Image (cartoon, helix red, strand yellow):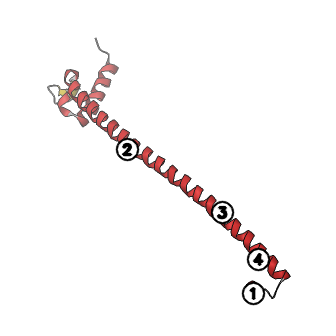
Amino acid sequence: MTTRSSGREEVHRAKEVEQVAPLFTFRNDKGEIEGVRYDRMSVLFVNAFKEQQAQIQQQQEQLKRVQALATEQEQEIRQQQEQTKRQQAVAERQQQQLDALQKVCRSRRRAALCR
């Protein structure tokens, strides 16, 4: 025995199913949607599961590519940081040499180096 509300819920579900897969619904003598052919829905579910699995695999492959790219970029960043440190060290040495040269030139303005 079904109640009116459960019957209406079944009709509502059947209308939703009909929008996606009309072959899985059935109608009464008046042509109104009456219910869902649940025994046939397994085919639909298997196909949906296959589609989901394919999407999951694609996303996993995409994630692997993104992770590999991130690792590569991290390595590049480390290399650039090391290069920056080396360049800073060179700049500091050059500044020290310049400071020393300026000191010499202040005390010996006539030196050939300072002209």
Q: Are marks 2 and 4 in contact (CB under 8 Å)?
A: no
Give x and y (percent) for residue 91: 67, 67
Of tags 3 and 1, which is closer to the observer?
Answer: 1
What SS does tag 3 mark?
A: helix
Quarter where residue 59 is shown = top left
Q: Which of these two is toward me, 21 or 75?
A: 75
Q: In terms of image quadrants, where is residue 43? A: top left
Quadrant in which the N terminus appears: top left
Q: Which residue is mark 1?
A: 112
Pick the front one: 77 or 19: 77
The residue type indicated by label 3 comes to: Gln
Counting residues from the start of the chain, the first of labels 3 and 4 encountered is 3
Of the two numbered discs 2 and 4 on the same chain, state the one appearing first in sequence: 2
- Alpha carbon of mark 3 to alpha carbon of mark 1: how far? 30 Å
Task: Give the residue drawn at x 17%, y 31%.
Answer: 23
Q: Earlier in the sequence, mark 3 or mark 2?
A: 2
On screen, 43 above or below 115? above
Q: Which residue is mark 2?
A: 62
Q: Earlier in the sequence, mark 4 or mark 1?
A: 4
Residue lying at 30% horizontally and 33% vertically, measured from the top left: 53
Under circle 1, the secondary element is helix
Secondary element type, mark 4: helix
Residue occupied by mark 4: 101
- The amino acid pointed to by label 2 is Gln
Q: Check whether the beta carbons of the residues at disc 4 and disc 1 lie within 8 A of each other.
A: no
Task: Calculate the distance from the C-alpha at mark 4 to the C-alpha at mark 1.
Answer: 12 Å
Q: Position of residue 79 (x, y in %)?
A: 54, 55
The disc at residue 88 is: 3
Image coordinates of residue 22 in percent, x first then y, are 19, 33
Residue type at the position of mark 4: Leu
